């Protein structure tokens, strides 16, 4: 082989191997992007799910709402409908109607400080 032919051959083989490496890098890059997008979507969905769970666990009702729900049940409305209408957990409404007191009332005697 002549010197030019040897150079061309070496250049061609190195170019082909670099193309293979570039294809592998591009394939890896595409897969990485896909997995990154999957992870980001999962993290976003998990965040939304946790927010919904938190909102459902943390009650956002006032004692007034509970009293109104109890009045509605006394007037003939079902516990389920009253709890949905006033935003009270159904179990809480059922417990209060059964005579159970709130945690605040039952734990008053265990408080170190006097109520305000």
Image (cartoon, rainbow, N blue to C red):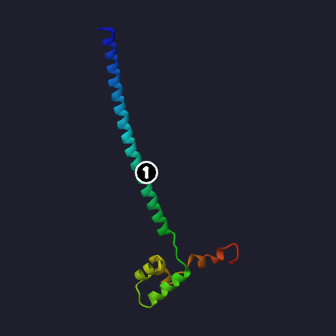
Q: Quadrant of residue 15?
A: top left
Q: Residue at x 41, y 53 (%)?
A: 42
Rendered-image quadrant of the N terminus: top left
Callout 1: SS: helix
Q: Is residue 35 above or below residue 28?
A: below
Please provide percent x and percent y for residue 102.
56, 78
Closer-to-camera residue (97/75): 75
Q: Indicate left or right for 60 with 78 as reference.
A: right
Q: Nearer the viewer, residue 94 or 65?
A: 65
Specify the quadrant of the image occupied by residue 63. bottom right
Percent across and percent down for residue 100 are 52, 81
Quarter occupied by the C terminus: bottom right
- For the residue pair 77 and 8, the one nearer the viewer reads as 8
Q: Relative to 17, is 45 above or below? A: below
Residue at horizontal 30 percent and vertical 12 percent from the top: 5
Q: Residue furthest top?
A: 2
- Which residue sits at x=36%, y=29%? 21
Give neighbour class at mark 1: few <14, some 14-19, many 20+ (Cα, 10 Å). few
Image spot of residue 32 (x, y percent): 39, 41
- Residue for badge 1: 40
User: Which residue sits furthest front?
Assistant: 4
Tell which residue pokes out farthest to the right in this image: 113
How many numbered badges does the structure rendering display?
A: 1
**Residue furthest toward the bottom?**
75
């Amino acid at each position: 082989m002549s010197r030019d032919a040897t150079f061309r051959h070496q250049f061609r083989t190195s170019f082909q191997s670099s193309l293979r490496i570039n294809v592998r890098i591009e394939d890896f890059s595409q897969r990485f992007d896909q997995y990154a997008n999957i992870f980001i979507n999962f993290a976003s969905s998990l965040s939304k799910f946790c927010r919904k769970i938190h909102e459902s666990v943390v009650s956002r009702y006032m004692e007034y709402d509970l009293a109104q729900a109890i009045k509605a049940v006394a007037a003939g409305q079902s516990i389920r409908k009253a709890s949905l209408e006033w935003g009270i957990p159904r179990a809480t409404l059922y417990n209060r109607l059964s005579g159970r007191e709130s945690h605040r009332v039952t734990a008053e005697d265990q408080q170190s400080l006097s109520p305000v």
